[in-house]
Image: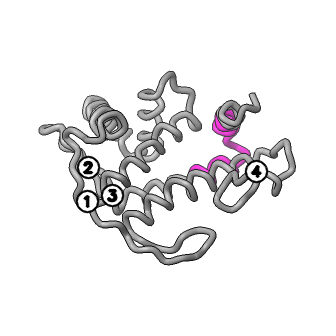
């Protein structure tokens, strides 16, 4: 059985080491989610086969559907939130640490709008409210006056891929004991080992 885009379960010795758990998480998030979103939005080279694919026109909201669950996933693996909205918030702040410098009310409005109008809108209603596709200065921009979010579907997958690299590096650092413990607890729970 394939457990990542490049490993089958028979390729590994069980039980897994901590490093193997991190690598599996990384390979699954990168190869089965973020790289796929990047290919859909921007085209590029597939993993495994090495085929060149073109971007898909008018795929922006599909790219968002692929990408937005990453925030909740990272929130669960980086913290101990209670519920999906809380995990989403932890994940957004993990991916965009510069938000910690902003006013709390603006951050709360932004994260709430991103969760409610983008994540929930797309997952539950196949549409969004107050979310636009465009090319803001960053991958995601928020206007607190209009409460509108503008997201670049071309840039967002690459921002998330860069975060995943930083997250992996942080997990491999043995000094990050709390993060490593939270990650392993969640990984084991999600894989049925806990």
Q: Residue at x 30, y 41 (%)?
A: 126
Total marks drawn?
Answer: 4
Left or right of 148 in this view: 186: right
**Residue furthest front in the image:** 1
Q: Which residue is mark 1?
A: 137
x and y percentages locating residue 36 in the rendered image: 48, 60
Q: CA distance from mark 4 to mark 1?
A: 37 Å
**Range covered by the magenta-colored residues:** 166-183
Q: Which residue is mark 2?
A: 141
For the residues bearing labels 1 and 2, Cβ distance under 8 angstroms: yes
Q: Which residue is mark 3?
A: 153
Q: How is the image coloured?
A: one colour
Q: Residue at x 41, y 33 (%)?
A: 89
Q: Which residue is mark 4?
A: 20
Nearer the observer, disc 2 or disc 3? 3
**Residue furthest top in the image:** 82
Residue 59: image quadrant is bottom left
x and y percentages locating residue 159 in the rendered image: 43, 57
Q: Main secondary structure of the magenta part?
A: helix
Residue 103 visible somewhere in the drawing = no
Q: Residue at x 48, y 31 (%)?
A: 87
Q: CA distance from mark 2 to mark 4?
A: 36 Å
Nearer the observer, disc 2 or disc 4? 4
Mark earlier in primary sequence (2, 4): 4
- At numbered mark 1, what does the secondary structure look like: helix, strand or loop? loop
Mark earlier in primary sequence (2, 3): 2
Left or right of 138 in this view: 34: right
Q: CA distance from mark 3 to mark 1?
A: 13 Å
Residue 125: image quadrant is top left
Mark earlier in primary sequence (3, 1): 1
x and y percentages locating residue 162 in the rendered image: 50, 58
Categorize mark 4 by other alpha carbons within 10 Å: few (<14), some (14-19), many (20+).
some
């Amino acid at each position: 059985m394939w457990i990542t885009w490049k490993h089958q379960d028979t390729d590994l010795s069980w039980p897994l080491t901590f490093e193997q758990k991190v690598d599996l998480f990384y390979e699954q998030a990168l190869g089965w989610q973020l790289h796929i979103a990047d290919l859909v939005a921007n085209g590029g080279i597939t993993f495994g086969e090495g085929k060149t694919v073109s971007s898909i026109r008018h795929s922006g909201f599909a790219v968002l559907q692929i990408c937005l669950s990453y925030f909740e996933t990272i929130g669960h693996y980086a913290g101990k939130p209670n519920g999906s909205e809380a995990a989403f918030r932890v994940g957004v702040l993990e991916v965009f640490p510069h938000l910690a410098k902003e006013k709390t009310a603006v951050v709360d409005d932004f994260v709430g709008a991103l969760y409610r109008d983008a994540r929930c809108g797309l997952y539950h209603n196949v549409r969004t409210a107050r979310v636009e596709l465009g090319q803001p200065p960053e991958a995601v921009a928020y206007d607190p006056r209009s409460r509108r979010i503008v997201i670049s579907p071309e840039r967002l997958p690459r921002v998330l891929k860069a975060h995943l690299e930083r997250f992996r590096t942080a997990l491999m650092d043995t000094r990050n004991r709390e993060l490593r413990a939270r990650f392993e607890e969640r990984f084991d729970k999600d894989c049925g080992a806990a």
